[in-house]
């Protein structure tokens, strides 16, 4: 209780200290007040004395009251177009889950790969990786967890010892969480930090071009695939290699697949909408030229087009005539994540409006003495540490305004600084609280913190090396 009270007071005290003592010798200035707001929000994001959504609403109140920004402008940050990319992705996820497409995909992969423990783990990882490229990694884990728990229960019957049961369960659950996180790195719609970066980049460097769905995929997808392979090797070596698991029967999985029966009309129609959205995302810069204002069409436009189609296309169920999605399904949208997005955008706007970005840029000129790769290493490690204790969205929201100032001071390619930071923000693998997928699988009660920390440390280290290698390759 006392810890929570201290954390609750830390935010306002941090704000008061900066507002009173000032930054850059400007006590009580707009810049000092903005710095105080940023520290208040950052402390509450990291210490979590209140829900993240409540903290995320602070800029909506503080910026107008402190005279930093107009309420109309601040409120507009909370409904930026990138948010509709996130909303559309979640609605696609709800349709896939509602009609069981994820379970069919998982069983298809496992039946093709095999039922040995290592092969099952590979099948789970491939499924989670592929699905989380297109929908939130949190939604991916939530959708696949029931199927994975059923696999664990079935495999428990084949193992000779409790030790084997525990190690297999830990390996499969960690594989699910980590693969979903890694898959989310590959596309702009895969995980919220990517969309936060995309919006920030368009806002500040949109006239430079060079960043859209295809450009991100060409950089991040190869890294994501290598990272997935490294994750498989690490989990296999830590949890499965030394155990002599008895052979498992593939018949169980084939039986589950047969129970699903032939493809239902709803599954086919959801799959077609999903594939259409993917094709449009990849080819947007080519097909948008047929429209009168192609620059007005964004990746978020595609996401909302796909989402809207789900509410109009009939499911094909003769007994219950209804569309693929109903509004009742959309009520599950995570409002707290939308608020978290908006607060970061509002903070970034406040940094610029108050002049704090320019002040930071002036004080960060010492970074000019560093080479680009040295700066990238510092950025990756710093974001990685923050993301182990704060949410990945909060981590990148806090870093982007600072990186903007660094870029202004150094003149480096903004992508060279912000892309590695964005990728590193997703890499909280060590602690159960680091990412939502970690929390979900840890809550299943089939692993201990030590197992997650050992595997997570090796993954954090491997991921950092891969991100730096990516930077050396492209910049």
Image (tube, rainbow, N blue to C red):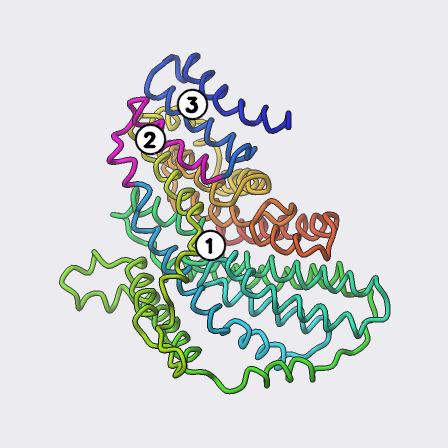
Tell me the quarter of the image containing the N terminus: top right
Q: Residue at x 27, y 64 (%)?
A: 285
Give yes or no for contact between labels 3 and 2 (Cβ–Cβ under 8 Å): no
Please report the bounds of the magenta region as a residue range: 52-76
Report helix, strand or loop for mark 3: helix
Give yes or no for contact between labels 1 and 2 (Cβ–Cβ under 8 Å): no
Q: Distance from label 3 to label 2 (Cα)?
A: 11 Å
Q: Which residue is mark 3?
A: 36
Whether residue 161 is visible: yes
Position in image of residue 435 (x %, y %) = 57, 48
Q: Which residue is mark 2?
A: 350
Q: Distance from label 1 to label 2 (Cα)?
A: 25 Å
Magenta span contains residue 1: no
Q: Residue at x 40, y 39 (%)?
A: 344
Magenta span contains residue 53: yes
Which tag, 1 or 2, sits closer to the chain's start? 1
As drawn, the residue found furthest toward the left would be 292
Position in image of residue 345 (x %, y %) = 35, 40
Q: Which residue is mark 1?
A: 191
Q: Distance from label 3 to label 1 (Cα)?
A: 29 Å
């Amino acid at each position: 209780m006392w810890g929570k009270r201290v954390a609750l007071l830390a935010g306002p005290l941090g704000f008061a200290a900066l507002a009173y003592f000032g930054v850059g010798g400007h006590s009580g200035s707009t810049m000092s007040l903005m710095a105080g707001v940023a520290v208040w929000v950052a402390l509450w994001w990291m210490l979590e004395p209140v829900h993240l959504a409540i903290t995320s609403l602070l800029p909506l109140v503080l910026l107008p009251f402190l005279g930093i920004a107009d309420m109309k402008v601040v409120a507009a940050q909370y409904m930026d177009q990138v948010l509709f990319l996130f909303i559309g992705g979640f609605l696609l996820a709800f349709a896939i889950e509602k009609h069981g497409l994820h379970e069919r995909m998982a069983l298809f992969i496992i039946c093709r790969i095999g039922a040995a423990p290592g092969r099952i783990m590979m099948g789970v990882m491939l499924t989670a990786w592929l699905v989380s490229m297109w929908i939130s990694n949190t939604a991916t884990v939530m959708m696949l967890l029931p199927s994975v728990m059923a696999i664990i229960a079935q495999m428990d019957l084949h193992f000779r010892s409790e030790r084997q049961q525990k190690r297999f369960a830990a390996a499969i659950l960690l594989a699910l969480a980590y693969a979903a996180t890694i898959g989310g790195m590959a596309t702009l719609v895969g995980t919220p930090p990517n969309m936060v970066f995309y919006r920030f980049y368009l806002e500040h460097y949109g006239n430079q071009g060079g960043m859209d769905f295809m450009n991100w995929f060409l950089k991040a997808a190869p890294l994501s695939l290598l990272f997935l392979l490294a994750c498989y090797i690490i989990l296999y070596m830590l949890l499965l290699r030394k155990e002599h698991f008895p052979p498992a029967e593939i018949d169980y999985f084939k039986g589950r697949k047969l129970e699903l029966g032939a493809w239902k009309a709803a599954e086919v129609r959801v799959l077609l909408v999903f594939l259409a959205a993917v094709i449009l995302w990849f080819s947007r810069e080519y097909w948008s030229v047929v429209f009168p204002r192609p620059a007005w069409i964004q990746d978020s436009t595609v996401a909302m087009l796909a989402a809207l189609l789900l509410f109009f296309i009939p499911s094909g169920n003769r007994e219950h005539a209804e569309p693929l999605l109903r509004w009742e399904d959309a009520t599950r949208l995570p409002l707290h994540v939308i608020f978290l997005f908006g607060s970061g955008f509002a903070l970034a706007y406040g940094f610029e409006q108050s002049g704090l970005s320019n002040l930071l840029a002036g004080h960060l000129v010492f970074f000019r003495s560093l080479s680009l790769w040295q700066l990238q290493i510092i950025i990756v490690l710093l974001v990685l540490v923050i993301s182990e204790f704060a949410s990945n969205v909060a981590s990148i929201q806090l870093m982007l305004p600072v990186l903007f100032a660094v870029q202004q001071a150094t003149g480096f390619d903004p992508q060279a600084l912000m892309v590695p930071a964005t990728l590193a923000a997703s890499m909280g693998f060590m602690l159960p609280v680091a990412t939502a997928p970690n929390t979900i699988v840890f809550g299943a009660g089939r692993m201990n913190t030590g197992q997650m920390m050992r595997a997570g440390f090796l993954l954090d280290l491997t991921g950092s090396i891969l991100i730096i290698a990516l930077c050396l390759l492209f910049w």
